Amino acid sequence: MMANGRIRPLWPVLISVLLALFATGCSNSTENGGLSLVDEQGNHPAGWVSSHPGFALPDGGNCVPCHGSVTSAAESGGISGVSCFLPSRNGQGCHVNGPSFTGIHGVPFRTAEHFLATDNSFASVCSNCHGIDPPSPLATAPPCRTCHTAGSPLTFLDCSSCHSDPPGGIAYPNIEGAHPVHDGLTGVTGVCDSCHNGLGTGTLAHYNAANARPGKDALRVPPGDVAFLSNFNAQSGPGSFDNAALTCTNVSCHGGQTTPNWQTGSIDPNTDCESCHVLGTTQFNSFVSGRHGTHVPFFVPAFGVVPTCVACHDTVKLADPAVGAHYDNLVTTAIDTRASVTIGGGTTLVQTYVPGPTTGTGTCTPDPASGCHAANPTRPW
């Protein structure tokens, strides 16, 4: 091929051949799968950075023809000249130590990318490996429902993907128990950490308790873990929860006494005062002033009168915020409401009570119909 006595340059032809070979070598097309990772110019499709993990897993086999070794930095790069070991490319962080095929993130995956996943980020990234429901595209990747039992975490956000807030069902992990009663208390409403301190969403303990995959990490067993904030510790010691009996002890709100069963028990504030208050000084809310030691053993249901404490203390006043609600400020061990303001009236046996100059002193005049102190009705406390 001579032209004007010179050889026609062949470089345009050679470049065309090389481009064809490059495209053919990197195409990775298969007749049975229809998979094409690059176009005829050797370019990956749009959105490749976020979607490529799904094509790379489980072993990087689809990457090797173009990018060389995925296990040896010295042998990586391949015909594309782009190594999988690059720390970054075009401002995009890559695999500085080489790609990992045990997963594209750590396990457990307790980061913002996990907890703040959206429909868009799930579809473009997570769904390459995980399904909402089983089976997942990647067999070794657990579906979301492994941990999120109540529904898709993209639809039922935060706590409600496993249980209501507070729990309100009959099956673990959404067992109602005494949650509604406690959640309604001043200073405690919506504060799960009061009884589950350090065990909330994002903690390892919470992850482990939600994980239902078979094996050593399958810890989803009732009841839920309990850890009280230190300001709920009773005078007698740190609060604790018995996983078998489902009872609490050493909790200041309950005067350090063992509580009824969390799921089946109950406390009636009109009759069960001594479930939380004991005579003496052993607890922050013990009663010991004046003549409690004389009166408390006398007023028992067996006498056919009235239960102990409500013989003198009006439960309506106990529940009245204007007077000083009984269950206010349970987040502290101090007694914020003077008990004397609840004495007398209502269905009590006390007509009047006049507080004294110091705590635990005063005078009491019983209701004449009660028969108490008939000979000398007004008595010092």
Image (spheres, rainbow, N blue to C red):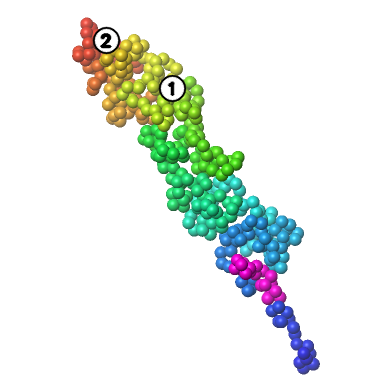
- Give SS at disc 1: loop
What is the quadrant of residue 317 in the picture? top left
Q: Is residue 62 left or right of residue 176?
A: right
Q: Secondary structure at mark 2?
A: strand
Residue appearing at x 49%, y 58% in the figure: 120
- Mark 1: amino acid: Gln
Measured from the top left, where is residue 20 in percent x and y? 68, 76
**Quadrant of the rendered structure where residue 55 is?**
bottom right
Is residue 337 rendered to the left or right of residue 103? left
Does 228 appear above or below 305?
A: below
Q: Residue at x 58, y 43 (%)?
A: 214
Residue 273: x and y in percent read: 35, 21
- The extreme left residue here reads 369
- Residue 58 location, x and y as percent? 64, 56
Q: Residue 379: which disc?
A: 2
Residue at 26% in and 15% down? 305
Q: Which disc number belongs to residue 199?
A: none
The residue shown at (63%, 74%) is: 40
| Extreme residue in the front direction | 32
Upstream in the sequence, badge 2 or badge 1? 1
Which of these two is toward me, 288 or 183? 183
The stretch in magenta equals 18-37
Q: Position of residue 17 (x, y in %)?
A: 71, 78
The magenta stretch spans residue 28:
yes
Q: Which residue is mark 1?
A: 257
How would you rate the neighbour count of disc 1 (Cα within 10 Å): few for under 14, some for 14-19, many for 20 or more?
Answer: many
Quarter of the image with the N terminus in it = bottom right
Q: Is residue 138 magenta?
A: no
Task: Say whether residue 235 is left or right of residue 54.
Answer: left
